[in-house]
């Protein structure tokens, strides 16, 4: 199955993607995680995108499309994938349609208040990328990942001014994709407000599993 997870920042796309890849036995491709790994490695790509990401802006379409095109050509995704955080603009969606056919687009529906609550409390493992939350899903030991023992930190783009910018960018550049994919008959809406286990069940029903 070839899926896109679409939704505002902090809607829970990455959290559900981790569960969904186990259920569907497919790969998660998170453009945000790929960019964060590049920043951590201080690669040429990382040096180029760090300031853009910290400010809550989007990386340019050309760079992002080239990265996804290359990733989707790899062998491990030929049976399916979840694109988590791509496409984010109409040009990205148009480019994607030239190199991959998508089965469904899962649209995470959540009000801004939910986004602010989730991003305000998000804690992430620097090593394995697992998402915790200061209230809803705390690591067993403060500051240490339950899964790999890595350091749990607050993402630079989870600072209040960057969160506001990301929401603005989402409304202007990404939200138009909802109609773009609805018109193509690919959109499946998911209520992203409940706790994770309920969302997983609703996702399975929506996928006919
Ligand atoms: P990216 O990493 O994709 O960020 P995002 O879309 O803003 O999404 P998030 O990772 O913030 O949120 P999420 O929806 O995955 O929520 P999560 O599961 O973590 O992108 C980062 C940056 O990279 C962008 O700003 C941009 O600069 C660049 N970039 C990436 N893709 C790009 C593209 N295509 N084009 C251009 N630039 C691009 O959950 C959030 C929190 O809530 C966690 O703490 C979690 O534990 C908690 N939580 C999740 N679900 C629930 C639930 N059901 N109940 C309670 N708590 C929950």
Image (cartoon, helix red, strand yellow):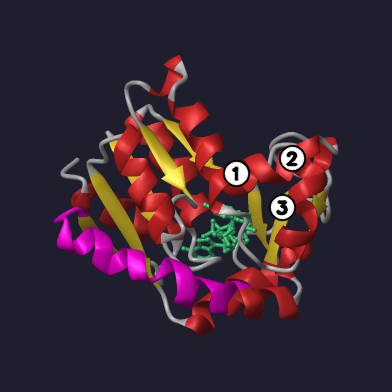
Does the magenta run of residues contain 174?
Answer: yes
Position of residue 39 in the picture relative to residue 118 (left or right): right
Residue 191 showing in the rendered view: no
Q: Pointers 2 and 1 in contact (CB under 8 A)? A: yes
Query: Which residue does the numbered mark 3 point to in the structure image?
Result: 124
Q: Quadrant of residue 116?
A: bottom right
Q: Secondary structure at mark 3?
A: strand
Q: Position of residue 33 (x, y in %)?
A: 63, 44
Closer mark to the observer between disc 3 and disc 1 = 1
Q: Quadrant of residue 149?
A: top right
Position of residue 206 in the picture relative to residue 139 (left or right): left
Closer mark to the observer between disc 3 and disc 2 = 2
Q: Secondary structure at mark 1?
A: helix
Which mark identifies residue 45? 2
Q: Which residues are magenta?
A: 166-186
What's the distance in space between the residues labelled 3 and 2, CA to CA? 21 Å
Q: Is residue 73 above or below residue 201?
A: above
Dot 3 or dot 1, earlier in sequence: 1
Query: Which residue does the numbered mark 1 point to in the structure image?
Result: 63
* Mark 3 Cβ and ligand 1 under 8 Å apart: yes
Q: Quadrant of the C terminus?
A: top left
* Magenta region, main secondary structure: helix
Q: Residue at x 76, y 63 (%)?
A: 54
Q: Quadrant of the N terminus?
A: top left
In this view of the protein, which residue sits in the foreground, 19 or 41?
41
């Amino acid at each position: 199955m070839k899926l896109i997870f679409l939704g505002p920042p902090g809607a829970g796309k990455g959290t559900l993607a981790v569960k969904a890849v186990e259920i569907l036995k497919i790969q998660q491709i998170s453009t945000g995680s790929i960019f964060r790994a590049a920043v951590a490695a201080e690669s040429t790509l990382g040096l180029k995108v760090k300031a853009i990401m910290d400010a809550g802006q989007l990386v340019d379409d050309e760079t992002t499309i080239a990265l996804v095109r290359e990733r989707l050509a790899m062998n491990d995704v030929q049976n399916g994938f979840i694109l988590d955080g791509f496409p984010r603009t109409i040009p990205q969606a148009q480019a994607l349609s030239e190199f991959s056919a998508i089965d469904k687009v899962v649209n995470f529906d959540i009000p801004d208040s939910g986004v602010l609550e989730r991003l305000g409390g998000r804690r992430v493992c620097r090593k394995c990328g697992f998402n915790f939350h200061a209230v809803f899903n705390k690591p067993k030991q403060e500051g240490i990942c339950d899964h790999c023992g890595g350091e749990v930190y607050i993402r630079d783009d989870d600072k209040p001014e960057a969160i506001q910018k990301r929401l603005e960018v989402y409304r202007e550049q990404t939200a138009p994709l909802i109609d773009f994919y609805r018109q193509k008959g690919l959109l499946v809406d998911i209520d992203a407000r409940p706790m994770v286990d309920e969302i997983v069940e609703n996702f399975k029903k929506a996928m006919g599993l």
